[in-house]
Image (cartoon, coloured by chain):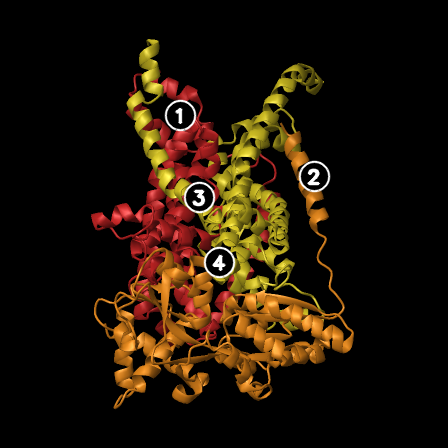
Chain colours: A orange, B red, C yellow
Amino acid sequence: MVRPIRKLFLALVAATALTAALPAYAESSLLNVSYDVSRDFYKDYNPIFQKHWKTTTGESIELKQSHAGSSKQVRAVADGLEADVVTMNQASDIDFLVEKGLVVKDYAKKFPNNASPYTSTMVFIVRKGNPKALMDWPDLVKPGVQVILPHPKNTGNGRYSYLAAWGYALKQPGANDKAAQEFVGKLLKNAPLFASGGRDATTSFMQRKLGDVLVSFESEAELIAKEFGKGEFDVVYPSLSILTEFPVALVEKVVDKKGTRKQAQAYLDYLWSKEGQENAAQNYLRPRDPELLRKYAAQFPAIRTFTVDEVFGGWPKAFPAHFKDGGTFDQIYQSK
Amino acid sequence: MNKRVLPGFGLSLGVTLVYLSLLILLPLSGLVFKSSSLSLTQFWDIASGERALASYRVTFGASLLAALINALFGLIVAWMLVRYPFPGKRLVDSLVDLPFALPTAVAGITLATLYAGNGWIGRHLEPLGLKVAFTPLGIVVALTFISLPFVVRTLQPVIEDIEPEIEEAAASLGASRLHTFTRVLFPAIFPALLTGFTLAFSRAIGEYGSVIFIAGNMPLISEITPLLIISKLEQYDVVGATALACVMLAISFLLLLGVNAIQWWAANRHQGDHQGPERASQ
Amino acid sequence: MSAPSLRMATAEPRWLRWTLTGIGLAFLFFFLALPLLAVFYEALAGGWSAYLQALKEPETLHAVGLTLFIALFVMPFNVMVGVAAAWAIAKFEFRGKSLLITLIDLPFAVSPVVVGLVFLLIFGAQGIFGPWLSAHDVKIVFALPGMVIVTLFITFPFVARELIPLMQAQGREEEEAAISLGATGWNMFWRVTLPNIKWGLLYGVILANARAMGEFGAVSVVSGHIRGETNTLPLHVEILYNEYNAVGAFASASVLALLALVTLVAKTLVEWQMRRETETLDTVLPAEAVRSKE
């Protein structure tokens, strides 16, 4: 009765020892720590860069990817995850690394276009044929309309949705912050739930058939089509929306320690090359290159947008004003 | 009490204490230490905010409900698995561990889909006016799922261990089945039932991954405390997060200590001075 | 007393048996079988070939390997400490016992995210030992050691908590008898205690194992999510889901569900082994009994 258990122990010890073989490190390798839905983009981009690097320098390079929620990722970098480069979906995330001394203060100036190689915007996904005729932001605050969006305080896309609605309301004639807060408050009242993330919001809207409209990244609409079929929904472009930027930066401390500054710089620079930009367009992210934007015009309808910098004075102001404890989001839920 | 007859007390307790201190207590005291950088008023403000208080109610209330559901049905399931023959029993038995192996996010997504208005279960409940997904009820469902194995698995070995002679003795002394159960069997399995309940409850308190997918996460209504902790972390407010974590830790600790004390008391009362429960009932 | 009335008092009447079985099965159906079915339904939404294709991805395979490695690695620790703790608590009386049990329970009540955070506060770059670790180039968090440590933390209570009520119910008589007959401590443990607690131990190990494989929150905080390197299966599932690869995500989740069915195999195996052992024991025992008398 005893022996099988003892045997099991021995077998376990042996199995443990055998599996202990860990992956080996290559000579030159970069770790790109990124947000969660950028995988498709970098899965395509990495081979492009590897080829480019091989032909220009003759060296081969290993590229490793890490994807998870954006702010979780930068916290990990601050806590010692050795990222050579960070590629995020919100400047506030990189600002945190600036604060920790891992990224230079003027990182946005180190690369063109505010260090954001591509952009996107927030759009409406509605049911096929748009039965409730939801055309613009004011339609979303009407009574009886249900809006699905990710958690406005805790998720990146939720914050962009929130700021998009706020910015729209603020840009109306005679509007002020108070009116904007009221507008956003009405919008949030129409939300039956706050999804835990972009993907979860999509599942609730598409699969569970909740709500009349889903506020989402333009780039995500294509992913939705891939998963649920193109004929299942319509995309509506509001009259005004927010320009979402996806800033990239070198992690100074890590590239200096690992001696990978040259490679990391080239890796990020090449995002602005023709190949890099075309890859963005193919992944439904708006390229910065005007020529390519024209080429893919059918995919990217013209839309009036504003940036966080223009309307909110940048993330360092917008974040505490709206999303920290006691910010406007919390105020909306206190007044109830 | 002749406690020194059996060997290994010093060794086993020593190993336990060292391991417990290194792996559990030291790290957790780091948490308390971190939160101590807050002043007392700051700590109080975070811990007693309107949203925080509401979240404690949701978290502890839903956990309690889930643990009670599990205690009742877990007892039935464990009893059924040990005592009653039925086809496919082995498969059913092995299914019980599933909630642990399934990543909590998958559990949350799947349950939300099942209980949503158009889901396999939700579509039958919603016409009855019962909304589960994206309400506090959804939280109870998720917590029941993720803590389901505890009661069943703590009871199973104990029920298996009950010697048939006790029941036969009770029966031959003229006890009815109900009487045998309440007077002989239930006291024997009660400590294990309480253990299972405690474990299910404590596991439910800390759960985050599955709940956020089905809760709806509405402030003041369906917001659990772990979500508020995440929310603090999203604002890079690690200290604030540790403050909330400390409050949860303290409440959980006191609740668990209470339940464990009751259990110890119940076990001692039944054991007389040093006899096992089976002796006491013979 | 006549046989029928004895049976009536030692077993439930038939209607009650059926009712209870019905209730139990219905509960398990709604809370276990349906979610499991839904997972497989989603995993197979694209057909078998898509399912298998999703599982064949090297990153998925690596995640499976890493998950199994971590689960196997923590198992011996959990068994040793769990048995030791249960032995001390169930067989002896001492002050502060309730406190000790409560401390053992505590890891369950700590939110997994907080568990991860706690270890970051200690081993992270901004943590207590962070500067020292980085100066000596020792990697704990965002590498395998950190993932193992948090898994040890979250699975710590299982074995002890499974064993304590069982060992308490069993009492001390058998072990005391063994000792008074002159058995050494280890002998008593291997011959008397272990056979008595085997089911509880097995359940504890299986539960801890399932939890070790399925854990997301705590591991996610300290893993760093590096693909093909520190990505466990649950983390992989989440990323695939977020990338709109539902088939891949649910296929990977179904692997975890299947791993949970290992219970079935393990239990059957132990039962079978034991039946064989008791058979051989019956023939060996008389001789051994004589030898121990000498």
Estimate how packed mark 4 is, as few (under 14), some (14 to 19) or many (20 or more) residues with alpha carbons within 10 Å: many
Closest to the observer, A277 or C277:
A277
Q: Are marks 1 and 3 on the same chain?
A: no
Asked if labels 2 and 1 touch by Cβ distance under 8 angstroms, the answer is no
Asked if labels 2 and 4 touch by Cβ distance under 8 angstroms, the answer is no
Quadrant assignment, res A126: bottom left
Q: Disc 3 sits on a residue from what chain?
A: C
Quadrant assignment, res A49: bottom right
**At 62% from the left edge and 80% from the top edge, which residue is drawn?**
A273
Gap in angstroms between the C-alphas marked 1 and 2: 36 Å
Callout 3, which amino acid?
A: Leu
Gap in angstroms between the C-alphas marked 3 and 2: 33 Å
Asked if labels 4 and 1 touch by Cβ distance under 8 angstroms, the answer is no
Q: Which residue is mark 3?
A: C36
Between disc 4 and disc 2, the foreground one is 4
Asked if labels 2 and 3 touch by Cβ distance under 8 angstroms, the answer is no
Q: Quadrant of the N terminus of chain A?
A: top right
Q: Which residue is mark 1?
A: B84
Which residue lies most toward the right here? A58
Closest to the observer, B201 or A237:
A237
Q: Disc 1 sits on a residue from what chain?
A: B
Callout 4, which amino acid?
A: Tyr
Residue B212, given in percent of the width and then of the height, sits at: 39, 59
Q: Is residue C72 left or right of residue B69?
A: right
Q: Are marks 3 and 2 on the same chain?
A: no
Helix, strand or loop at mark 4: helix
Q: Which residue is mark 2?
A: A10
Residue C175, given in percent of the width and then of the height, sits at: 57, 29
